[in-house]
Amino acid sequence: MALESRGHCLKSLRTRPPKELLRTMIAARKKAGLTQHELSVRPVRHQSFVAKYETGEPRVEVIEFPHICKTLGARADKLLRGLP
């Protein structure tokens, strides 16, 4: 079910994240020289969680995003810059 705000239709919270964000996060992990497994043990979660969020299922929680960025050595604002 879509949410409405000021006459604009926002996507449901259950929709998949933008592909641009996923590509950016994957690129940041690779730039940091980390495999999914290496990222998962720094303590993000299990490798399967990293693999799943990199495909968009499940969505990365707002509270987890800065931690993932810190683990990658990337700034959250730079990863989000330029997204639609």
Image: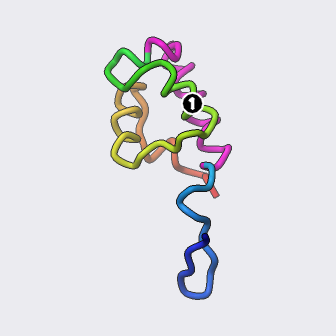
* Horizontal arrangement in the rendering, residue 75 relative to residue 54 (left or right): left
The quadrant the C terminus occupies is: bottom right
Looking at the picture, does residue 46 appear above or below residue 55? Answer: above
Q: Residue at x 39, y 26 (%)?
A: 73
**Residue 32 located within the stretch drawn in magenta:** yes
Q: Residue at x 40, y 41 (%)?
A: 65
Q: Which residues are magenta?
A: 17-38
Q: Quadrant of residue 41?
A: top left
Q: Residue at x 60, y 49 (%)?
A: 17
Instruction: Name the residue beneath numbered marker 1.
Output: 52
Q: Position of residue 42 (x, y in %)?
A: 34, 18
**Closer to the camera in the image, 36 or 80:** 36
Looking at the picture, does residue 22 appear above or below residue 1? Answer: above
Q: Position of residue 37 (x, y in %)?
A: 48, 13
The quadrant the N terminus occupies is: bottom right
Q: How is the image coloured?
A: rainbow
